[in-house]
Image (tube, rainbow, N blue to C red):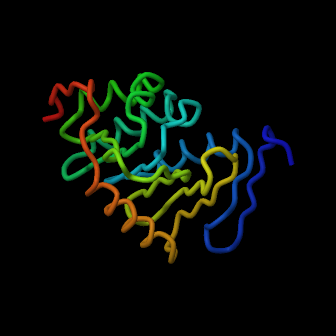
Amino acid sequence: MGNDENVTNNDSDNRFRASGREAIIENVALAFEKARHQVSIFSPILDSNYFNTTRVSDALAKVCTGGRPNRVRILVQRGDETIRNNGRITSLAQRLSDFIELKQLESGIATLSEMFIVVDRNGYLRQPDSEKPECLVSFGTSNELGALSRQFDTLWERSERIPGLNVLGLGR
C-alpha cells in the first residue's frame, strides 16, 4: 500500500483504520467537524497538511463560538515549528485565546512519536507514529478513548506556554 492511497476500513463499532495521507487529512477534518464542546490534540509538531487547512480552522472556530465551556487544547513538542508552519491555527489561538490554548511540553520530556485527537471525550483519531500515514479513528465509545484522555491530561500538566506566541484574549 503506497503513501498516497486513501483507504478506510470500517467495522461495526464506528472504529476504523485509515491509511494514506488523504485519508488522514479527511478524518482529521471530520473529527473537528464532529466536535461540539471540547477538542484535545497532541502531536510532536502539528502537520500543516492535516491542521493548517480552511476546513479545520473553520470547524475549530465553530467549536469556539458555540458557547461556554467550549475548549480546544493543543499540545505539541516543538512549538516554534508549529507556530511557523500553522498560521491558521496560530491565528485562531491568538484571537480566541479564551477558548483555544496552544502549548508545548516542558523541555526534558522524551520525544513522543504519536499524534492523537480526542473529541468531546466520545471520539478520537490516533496516529501511533506521526511519520507513518496510518491512524485509528473511533466516533463512538472505546476503551482506548479513556486512556487517550488521561494521557493527554497528564501531558498537559507538564506543558508551558510557547515562547513567541502572543495572545490577544478577544474570545469573550
Residue 157: name its quadrant. bottom left
Please determine whether, in this image, residue 117 is positioned above or below residue 6. Answer: below
Residue 29: x and y, percent? 54, 42
Q: Across the whole image, how many numbered discs are drawn on residues?
A: 0
124 or 61, which lies in front? 124
**Which residue, as the protein is rendered here, is positioned at the far front?**
108
Residue 143: x and y, percent? 50, 77
Position of the C terminus, as image quadrant, is top left
- x 47%, y 53%: residue: 117
Please determine whether, in this image, residue 86 is positioned above or below residue 8. Answer: above
**Which residue, as the protein is rendered here, is positioned at the far bottom?**
143
8 or 164, which lies in front? 164
- x 50%, y 52%: residue: 112
Viewed as shown, does residue 49 lie left or right of 76? right
- x 46%, y 46%: residue: 32
Residue 164: name its quadrant. top left
Residue 22: x and y, percent? 70, 39
